[in-house]
Image: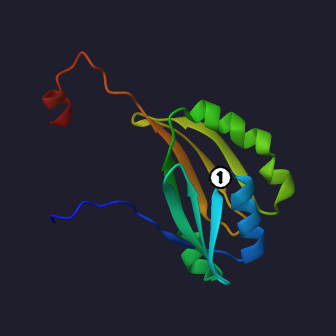
């Protein structure tokens, strides 16, 4: 492809569209209402479409990964929002450390699973070609 990709915007569903809209605004996303049943949520140039559509199998199998600079700081900010007290069915799972990096998890009010992750920094004393093998 010769065209430069500018963004990727997944579509996710909502069991209760108004509750999900409120949840994502509280999470820090800026909402642009596109229609009565579709909004675009963005943060720092990244975004997704939230639609007033619910298919349980689809929602139960939807995951979004958001890469962050500092997963520890992001975790603390998530805790400070107290989303689990404000929204039914919202769940937070603490940070886990893996070979590739670290991540924590958040289930939204509908059940969409969000991964907030930080990739391990490349060890700068190793040649890049050795890391690619």
In this image, 71 relative to 15: left or right? left
Q: How is the image coloured?
A: rainbow
> How many dots with numbers?
1
Q: In this orientation, which residue lies closer to the viewer: 74 or 40?
A: 40
Residue 49 sits above or below residue 29 on the image: below
Q: Position of residue 94 (x, y in %)?
A: 66, 40
The C terminus sits in image quarter: top left
Q: Position of residue 33 (x, y in %)?
A: 64, 74
The relative height of residue 80 versus residue 92 in the rendered view (above or below) is above
Q: Residue at position x 61%, y 83% from top?
A: 55
Q: How crowded is mark 1: few (under 14 residues within 10 Å), some or many (20 or more)?
A: many
Image coords of residue 110 (percent x, y): 69, 69
Q: Name the residue under label 1.
A: 106
**Position of 128 compared to 50: left or right?**
left
Relative placement, left or right, of 115 versus 73 is left
Q: Which residue lies furthest to the top in this view?
A: 125
Residue at 58% over, 55% down: 114
Front-lying residue, 59 or 4: 4
Q: Give the residue at x 78% y 39%.
A: 80
Residue 1 image offset from top left, x and y in percent: 16, 66
Residue occupying the point 20% across, 31% down: 131
Q: In this view, does 18 lie above or below 53?
A: above
- On the image, which quarter does residue 128 sit in? top left
- Residue 59 sits above or below residue 100 on the image: below
Could you tell me which secondary element the residue under label 1 belongs to? strand
């Amino acid at each position: 492809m010769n065209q430069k990709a500018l963004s990727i915007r997944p579509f996710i569903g909502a069991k209760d569209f108004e509750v999900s809209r409120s949840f994502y605004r509280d999470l820090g996303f800026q909402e642009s209402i596109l229609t009565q049943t579709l909004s675009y949520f963005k943060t720092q140039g990244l975004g997704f479409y939230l639609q007033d559509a619910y298919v349980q199998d689809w929602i139960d199998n939807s995951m979004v990964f958001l890469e962050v600079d500092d997963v520890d700081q992001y975790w603390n900010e998530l805790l400070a929002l107290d989303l689990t007290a404000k929204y039914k069915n919202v769940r937070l799972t603490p940070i886990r450390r893996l070979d590739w990096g670290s991540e924590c998890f958040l289930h939204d009010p509908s059940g969409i699973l969000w991964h907030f992750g930080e990739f391990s920094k490349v060890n700068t004393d190793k040649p890049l070609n050795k890391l690619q093998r």
